[in-house]
Structure formats: structure tokens, C-alpha cells
Amino acid sequence: MTVTLLYIEDDHEIGSVVSADLSERGYSVRWLRSGEGATEEAAPCQLAILDVMLPGLDGFTVGQRLKRAYPKLPILMLSARTSIDDKLQGLEFADDYLTKPFHPDELAARIEVLLRRNGASVQDSLALKHLVVYEGDNRVINAQTQEEVMLTGKQFQIFSYLLRHLGQIMTKEQIYEAVWGETYLEGDKTLMVHIRYLREKLELDPGHPEIIETVRGIGYRVRA
């Protein structure tokens, strides 16, 4: 699995060098020139690299927002500032702090350390449209609002079952029997009702669902 990094740096020269180096090391890099849209872009990422001096929102503010939205996302702060106060402010939410200028090998080494330290929990997350699903924690986060989507136990079981078969069409019988542990009876509307309520919580437009797709006459699927 390719590790995806969110990299926020407004300096084009530095950003180009760092982004190219990390890409050569096998990472998938999402490079932003400002903190605008960082929360949405971070959804599929396993680590964030964040410069302090940014246009508009400063790196401290962006980093705090990222940590609130994704508590398990490791954040590495970059800054030309060397004062202890700046470092302490950054380390209130960040997992590491690297002072500019730095050698690419040092940055890569620190990234590896953070990924190893946090890898297990971060790998449990799945980005899906505007949602981030933490299946191990039974949590779904709306990346646009940074709020948790509150699902009932049965709703999460249905969603989780579809996610475990991502991209596959699952029949109503398969879903019902896996979740309820009982034989499905033709015409039973229980699953359909649960899917409707689930869409009202998960979809941006429940009337035109983009996450849970109905395959007419067969069942449902969640597209990858």
C-alpha cells in the first residue's frame, strides 16, 4: 500500500525539491501551497508535513484543525523559526518539529519514525468521498465539517459489511444474513429502511446517493 503524505508549503522552490524527493522515495505526495482545504485533502493521508509560515492561516492554526479532525494523524512541523517558544507551541499538537534548513534524509528518517509509531492505527482509516472511516474504532468522520457521524450499531454493521466488500455488489440476502444472523425472507423491508436512514447520515444528497449505490433487483454496493 502506497503511503500518502499531505505536504503544505508555500515556497515553490522548497516545495518542489521536497515533493520530488519524497515521491522518489515511493510516497504519494499531496502538495498544498496554503492551509486552504487542508482538512479535506488530509482524509486519505497517513501523515501531514506542515510549514509554520503560510499565507492566510498560519501553520499552527492549520495543524490544530487537522489534529481535531484526525486525532491519530501524525503531524510533522517545519519551520525556519528556532525559538523554544515556537517549538513548544508546535509540539502542543504536532508529533515532531524539524527546523529549516534540513537535509532530505533527515526529513525522510523522521517520517519513517512517525509512520512506524503511528502506522497501525492510521492504516485502519479509509477515505471515502467526504468521509473518513475508522473501522477499528467504529467511527465515521465527515471531513468537510470535521464532525463525527453518529451511527447506530446496526447501521455501522451494514456499512462495515459493505466496506469489507468494497466495489462488490452484495445481495440483500447476503447483507441481511451477515448482519442479523437470520435467514432473509423475500419482501422484508428491514434492510431497506436501515439503508435509507444510513444514507440520510452519510450522503451529502440522500436523494442522489454517491456512497451506497442501489443495484436494482439485486442489492447494494459501496464504490471504491
Image (spheres, helix red, strand yellow):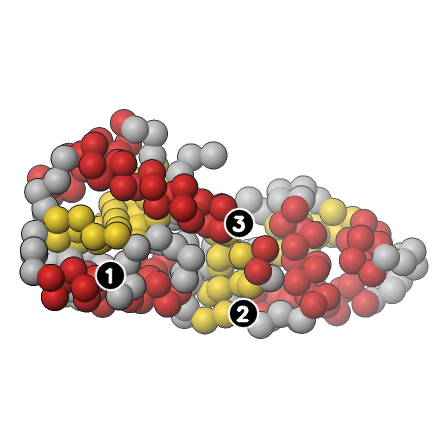
**214 horizontally vs 49: left or right:** right
Looking at the image, do the residues carrying marks 1 and 2 touch, with CB atoms under 8 Å apart? no
Q: Is residue 119 visible?
A: yes
Give the CA distance from mark 2 to mark 3.
Answer: 17 Å
Q: Is residue 217 visible?
A: no
Q: Secondary structure at mark 2?
A: loop
Q: Secondary structure at mark 1?
A: loop
**186 horizontally vs 155: left or right:** right
Decide which of tag 1 and tag 2 comes sooner along the chain.
1
The kind of residue tagged 1 is Leu
**55 horizontally vs 126: left or right:** left
Image coords of residue 78 (percent x, y): 17, 51
Say few, some or many: other residues with alpha carbon within 10 Å of mark 2 (under 14 / 14 to 19 / 20 or more). Answer: some
1 or 2: mark nearer the eye: 1
Image coords of residue 137 (percent x, y): 57, 60
Q: Which residue is mark 2?
A: 149
Vertical position of residue 221 compared to residue 60: above or below: above
Q: Secondary structure at mark 3?
A: loop
Q: Which residue in the rendered view is the most extreme toward the front?
A: 84
Image coords of residue 145 (percent x, y): 41, 70
Location of the C terminus (image quadrant): top right
Q: Which residue is mark 1?
A: 91
Say few, some or many: other residues with alpha carbon within 10 Å of mark 1 (under 14 / 14 to 19 / 20 or more). Answer: some
Residue 135's label in the rendered image is: none
Q: Which residue is mark 3?
A: 124
Give the CA distance from mark 3 to mark 1.
Answer: 24 Å
Image coords of residue 75 (percent x, y): 30, 54
The kind of residue tagged 2 is Val
Looking at the image, do the residues carrying marks 2 and 3 touch, with CB atoms under 8 Å apart? no
Decide which of tag 3 and tag 1 comes sooner along the chain.
1
The kind of residue tagged 3 is Asp
